[in-house]
Amino acid sequence: MFGFINLYKPTGFTSHDCVSKVRKLIDIKKVGHGGTLDPLATGVLPIAVGKATRLLQFLPETKVYRALIRLGISTSTDDLEGEVISSTSARHISKEKIVSFLDNFKGQIKQVPPMYSAIKQDGRKLYELARKGKSVDVIPRIVNIYQIKIINFFSGEYPEVDVEISCSPGTYIRAIARDLGAILGVGGTLANLIRMESCGMKLEDSIDFDTMNQKIQQNSLSLIDPGLILSHLEFISLNTHDAKRWCYGQTIDLIDNESENHNFNNLLCQKVSDKKVYLRMYQESKIFLGIGLLENRQGILTSKPKVVCLTSTSD
């Protein structure tokens, strides 16, 4: 089996729990996921099956979350799973006041991860140190918040604000809840979290374990084609001879395949000079071969195998 599953992660499951369950359901050992979700969170958990696990690093990076932030309460874990550290009435907080502070969370920002997180510092995971009562200065990280907007606002003693956040990998939504509460002067914690989109997969297309199991019983479970998920990458289609050489680990000149790819040299020559460019590689019959690294060798574009998903091609 080779491809991806857009899994709906239920509450109470760790991401590892989900991987283990998928392994048992489809009876295959090689299964991985495309980004950890906290146990209390729900939503999209990209699952890679078979050799697709090697493609996880190339998937689209943007994540989209729907988060419910409760104001007036601070907890040890920055969500409702932790111990309440402090509480105060936040009835005076209005939607308009929150909007006026949202720009602080847009763009490239420094974010201090929650103490209860799996990030390692000095060789130890932060949550391990937290459980032992050790206090450390957590090193801030650079994350990107592409968009944050209010969907709903619920007033009260402990008002709640429902926000949609589009961000880069590594962003902690719990930290945004904590920091929003801090900047408002009342404290804040994450009350609920749904991942709406991850690695190019959307919530409305996800399937839960019951549906997945039913499809397996009916022999109708189909995996998502890697080419669809990797559509943000440019592609090159090799002739049969070059496809075989590429799968054997050889670097291929792309000039002989230019007619297949709409003047590919002119399209990507500038990109190669700026940064690494990865390509979806196909055999001319549209068989997905893997991921190639585009290189410029004395003015000739070439593709060097980075991840080969097909061990051989047919003539």
Image: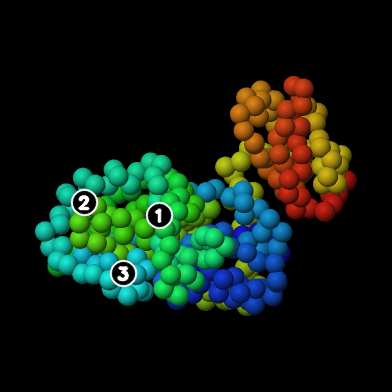
Whole-percent x, y for residue 298 in the image: 77, 22
Label 1: element kind: loop
Q: Is residue 228 visible to the viewer in this orientation of the structure? A: no
Label 2 or label 1, whichever comes before in sequence order? 2
- At a point 40% along the width and 62% down the height, the residue shown is 114
- At a point 30% along the width and 45% down the height, the residue shown is 104
Mark 3 and mark 2: Cα distance apart in space: 20 Å
Q: Which residue is mark 2?
A: 98
Label 3 or label 2, whichever comes before in sequence order? 3
Figure check: 279 above or below 164: above
Mark 3 and mark 1: Cα distance apart in space: 15 Å
- At a point 24% along the width and 47% down the height, the residue shown is 101
Mark 2 and mark 1: Cα distance apart in space: 20 Å
Q: Which residue is mark 3?
A: 75
Figure check: 286 above or below 173: above
Which quadrant would residue 192 be assigned to in this image? bottom left
Amino acid type of the residue that numbered disc 1 sits on in the rendered structure: Val
Q: Which residue is mark 1?
A: 112
Whole-percent x, y for residue 196 in the image: 42, 58
Query: Cβ–Cβ below 8 Å for labels 3 and 1?
Result: no
